[in-house]
Amino acid sequence: MWVAYGADSTGEIQFSDGILTTDSLVAGVSQLTGTGTINTQGIVSDIDLVLQSNADLTQSFTLNSQPSQNITLNLDIADSTYLGAGYTGNGSLTIGNGYSVNSSNGYIGQHAGSTGEVTVTDNAMWNLSVLYLSHHDGNGTLNITNGGEVNVEYVVWGGPNEEIHLDNGTLTTNGITVGASQLTGTGTVNAKGLVSDVNLVFDSADDFIQTITLNSQPGQNVTVNLDASSGCYVSGAGHVGSGSLSISNGMTLSSDFGYIGMETGSLGVTTVDGTDSTWNLGTNLRVGLEGNGTLNIMNGGTVNSSGFGAGSHIGYLTESSGVVNVDGEGSTLMENMSLFIGYIGQGTLRITNGGRVETGGSPQTNFYHNYIGGGPESQLFGVPTGSGNVIVDGEDSTWVNHEDLYVGYSGQGTLNIFNGGLVSVVDILTIDFDGNGDSFINMASGGMLAIFGDGDASLEAFLGLVEGTDAIRYWNDSISDWDLLAASAELGVDYTLEYISEGDLDGYTVLTVTAMPEPATLGLLSLGGLALMRRRSRC
């Protein structure tokens, strides 16, 4: 049972001589009020717990630190679901004296303002599936000392205030997200995946197995043994500081999750360079989670995000900035689910010089749409949603949308198509969904927009395939500014329309804008004031 899971959520359990029996309790002491009894097999709270023998697995605590609080907490924590310390306040857990404890999930310093500390010492062992440190901006410390061992089956998810302190201790995990400065002391980390503030280069098969020594901090001498040869749970670059990841020379890295620029202030850069150089992601990709992230796919490199999940985000949370560059013939980004460019943060996608992006290709149609500027549920974070910018520039530069495309959903979105670039939408194209008048498609110099359906009879027929507004703009040389096609563009002079009945675009109508701005103006991408847009319904 959780009480107030989310970072900004609140919750309370009120007792009046009642009994609560649960397999696990994850709650702060201050969230438990009144008089009653709790029986639980797992605990993450603000108490001090010591486990050194089988006898310690069964314990009782009296919670009476709050006014009118008198609650008996009975623990029987053998093979618990949840175990840890520090949920909304201060708590500690010590596992010692050679004792071994198993749990499914561990939480240390969960909510902002909490302080949790777990110590595994004196040849003791903690075996668990997933470990979260300072998950929602709490303060979490894991000490592994004097021969202690912590074995995490999946991953150690670390937050901005985490610390893993080693003193002749060992941490073994399938993946870890931790800043280089957050690994203190002397000891060993064995990991199959890593997101940190180090520079990783994978350009030969031997590079997937490497040893990294962290010793830049006073008293720090941590050996990280990385083995990503058979795939890993998480990979990327930039946790709380600066880091990079390079995949080249035809190498393939496989991971479930990919994170570039995780925490506020971090800087992560990942480059996939060269033919057959590949990064396969089983779940999703975050470029700029809360920090600053850049993903470069170049010279024929490929990134595939083909697994299950909400999709991939460029500029995910507040204060984040994400940039993805797909440059050069054969360079490809494949996202099987949804792609969000500027979800809550700032997101930029550049497709240039023949690069290719395909999005929303899941068999589960009509669900995994693509968004420039915001997206569904982004408002739930309680902050203004993001700003997204997409540039498709150059012959054979292509963005294929296998589902709906929203240019401006709950945020500001701009799609720029220039110099023979092509964007195709098989289902519905919506411009400025929220009606704020801040989202546009800018087209020039042979840029092509293809929408499925027969709309070549007139510009009005083509715009009838578009929902939201008619905010498709071209460069109007007579006013030296972007202008609405519907306002003043001339068919055969500024643009053409063609219905295609063969090839990859069979069944699409292609709008090609031929008007050419000055080269310097193209670089600005968004000149001019906001024009009044007409709301339209799809015909």
Image: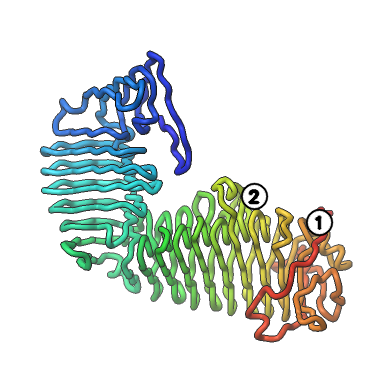
Residue contact at pointers 1 and 2, CB within 8 angstroms: no
Residue at image mark 2: 365
Kindly identify the residue that appears in the image at 48 percent across and 38 percent down. 9
Front residue of 387 and 323: 387
- Which element type, helix, strand or loop, lies under badge 2? loop
- Mark 2 Cα shell of 10 Å, populated few (<14), some (14-19), many (≥20): some
Front residue of 254 and 176: 176
Residue at image mark 1: 535
Asked if residue 146 can be seen in this view, the reply is yes
- Which element type, helix, strand or loop, lies under badge 1? strand
Against 500, residue 376 (above or below) is above
Answer with left or right where residue 536 lies relative to residue 188.
right
**Which mark sits nearer the N-terminus, 1 or 2?**
2
From the image, which quarter does the N terminus lie in? top left
Against 63, residue 308 (above or below) is below
Answer with left or right where residue 399 lies relative to residue 464.
left
Front residue of 444 and 364: 444
**Residue 206 placement (x, y as % from top left):** 28, 70
For the view shown, which residue lies furthest in the right direction? 457
- Mark 1 Cα shell of 10 Å, populated few (<14), some (14-19), many (≥20): some
Q: Amino acid at mark 2?
A: Thr
**Residue 449 placement (x, y as % from top left):** 73, 69
